Amino acid sequence: MNIFIFIVVFAVFIYTVGFSISLWKDMNKIGSIMVFILALVVIIVPFFTIIK
């Protein structure tokens, strides 16, 4: 079950980082930085909530 959670979280992280890169290319720098911070939160939060 933990492997499935890691795969889903990693997929969401990759998708969010890709969106952040597309925002950066469209010259929306602040939005890109905020979305990248959101992607980092997506990676960090499961370590404190799901995986104990």
Image (spheres, helix red, strand yellow):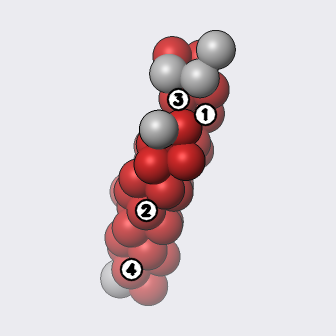
Q: Position of residue 28 (x, y in %)?
A: 38, 69
Residue tagged by mark 1?
44
Residue bearing mark 4 = 22
Mark closer to the chain start, 4 or 2: 2
Q: Say which amino acid is labelled 4.
A: Ser
Give the Cα separation between the discs numbered 2 and 3.
Answer: 13 Å
Q: Amino acid at mark 1?
A: Ile
- Asked which secondary structure carries label 3, the reply is helix
Give the side of residue 39 with respect to residue 23, left or right.
right
Task: Report, in whole angstroms, how far the alpha carbon at label 4 lies from the one at label 3.
Answer: 25 Å
Whether residues under marks 1 and 4 lie with C-beta atoms below 8 angstroms apart, the answer is no
Q: Which residue is mark 3?
A: 46
Residue projecting furthest to the front: 1
The structure residue drawn at horizontal position 47% and vertical position 38%, both measured from the top left corner, is 1
- Depth check: give the residue in front, 20 or 16: 16
Residue 25's disc number:
none
State which mark lies toward you, 4 or 3: 3
Q: Are marks 3 and 1 in contact (CB under 8 Å)?
A: yes
Sequence-first disc among 2 and 3: 2
Q: CA distance from mark 1 to mark 2?
A: 14 Å
Tell me if mark 4 has few (under 14), some (14-19) or many (20+) residues whose alpha carbon lies within 10 angstroms of its own.
few
